[in-house]
Image (tube, rainbow, N blue to C red):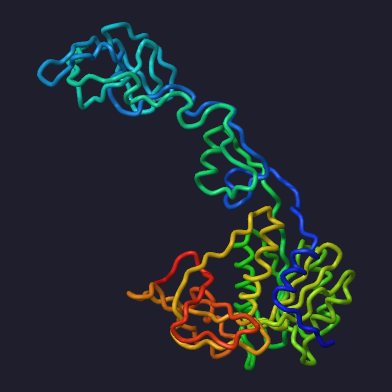
Amino acid sequence: MFRQLMTFEEAKKVVNEQLKLKILGEEEISLLEAYNRVLAEDVVATMDIPPFNRSTVDGYAVKAADTVGAEENQPVQLRICGQVSVGEQPKVMVNPGEAAEIVTGAPIPEGTDAVVMVEDTDSEDHLLRVYRAVTRDENVMKKGADIKKGETVLKAGQVLGASEIGVLAALGYSKAKVFKVPVVAVLSTGAEVTEPGKPLPAGKIYDINAYSISTAILESGGKPLYLGVIPDDKAALQAALKHALSSADMVITSGGVSVGPKDLTPQTVSSLGEPGLLVCGIAVKPGKPTTIALVGEKPVFALPGHPASALLIFHLLVRPVIQRMAGRTALEDKTVKAAASTRMFSAKGRRTFVMVKLKPDALRGFVAVPVETGASGAITTLAKADGFVEIPENQQFIDSGEEVTVTLLKSKLSL
């Protein structure tokens, strides 16, 4: 089978229009399991937070009017009528001219509307001297000041982080309704590939792709299902792919997508069911042999065996698919402007992605320095790169010093 190369834009259009992507449903899970999951419903507060007026300092609950005129040289004297502890309903009633000892977080007792900090008082027996006047509601967090009953505090589609889970806990939720996570089967092909942890025979390499791609799936909001290394045998590959399709919502393979005698993946994928192959080669560098298929409603991405190529194509085409299936908003990549440190050439007729490292420059902000690849199989290419520069198919090169747009691969730059 020989492939008719699609342009990069044509391949993206196929992914966006022909893959029948949908959110996989909802489930209710424990808050302790909800980190990084996507909320499936709006959350409306069923109570005020805090649910009562509470003190924000240690001190004495008072009627603000009783402290008028209090000064360092002329304290106001009040009678201590009791105390209020945290975690209990106040049992004391504070009358005019009285004060109740209170701790941070405790409910404000009836008859009071402010709290004097303990630093602004001294006491002897049941007599309190107040050296600074307070105003109404001073040092008091009012009922509903943080969250009001009936307020929509979280929206469907939000990713649950520590603060969002804290909000749910504050409202008394022990569970959260979230979108189901797409399960993505991952398998590698090739007689030269050995699973990490096993002895490395002569002429073989460890399976880089399955582990880097599985991690990228997690970062995209999916759940990887690693199915191991499959030999270059059509029957074994077909059986493995059928198992993958029955076990997962999506399949990603790496290797076996070029035109050599052992590159069996495109033919095997095309035999698994309709509609079959949608993309069989893309006019890009790196990543030209990328193959995309649809079996029933399940996407199959067959990525190149070279680790840097596989991860780049995952970033460009696969990541948005997983995000959409997981109910996530596919965020646009962040970009920065930089000056090219040297002339960067494109591959004739192919959209070229040049991996670069950004270096600060006093005059130009950043300089984009191409990462020496040696070969597209070097995994360190992406580890060293901060991002990539995209050169269109019809552009021969980017000249030294020319302003370029760098699409970032990392959220933070290692400058």
Q: Provide residue 351's location: percent of width, then percent of height.
A: 64, 81
Q: Provide residue 251's location: percent of width, then percent of height.
A: 75, 68
| Residue situated in front as seen by the camera: 390 or 120 | 390
| Residue situated in front as seen by the camera: 188 or 314 | 314
| Residue situated in front as seen by the camera: 314 or 79 | 314
Q: Residue at x 42, y 71 (%)?
A: 414
Q: Is residue 48 left or right of residue 207?
A: left
Q: Provide residue 240's location: percent of width, then percent of height.
A: 80, 74
Q: How many marks?
A: 0
| Residue situated in front as seen by the camera: 349 or 82 | 349
Quarter of the image for the C terminus: give it.
bottom left
Residue 213 in view here? yes
The answer to whether residue 315 is above or below residue 142 is: below
Q: Is residue 100 left or right of residue 224?
A: left
Q: Provide residue 47's location: percent of width, then percent of height.
A: 56, 26
Q: Quadrant of residue 297?
A: bottom right
Q: Is residue 25 left or right of residue 383?
A: right
The answer to whether residue 392 is above or below residue 86 is: below
Quarter of the image for the N terminus: give it.
bottom right
Residue 227 in view here? no
The answer to whether residue 300 is above or below residue 347 is: above
Q: Residue at x 65, y 75 (%)?
A: 313
Q: Residue furthest left?
A: 73
Q: Quadrant of residue 222?
A: bottom right
Q: Residue at x 52, y 28 (%)?
A: 148
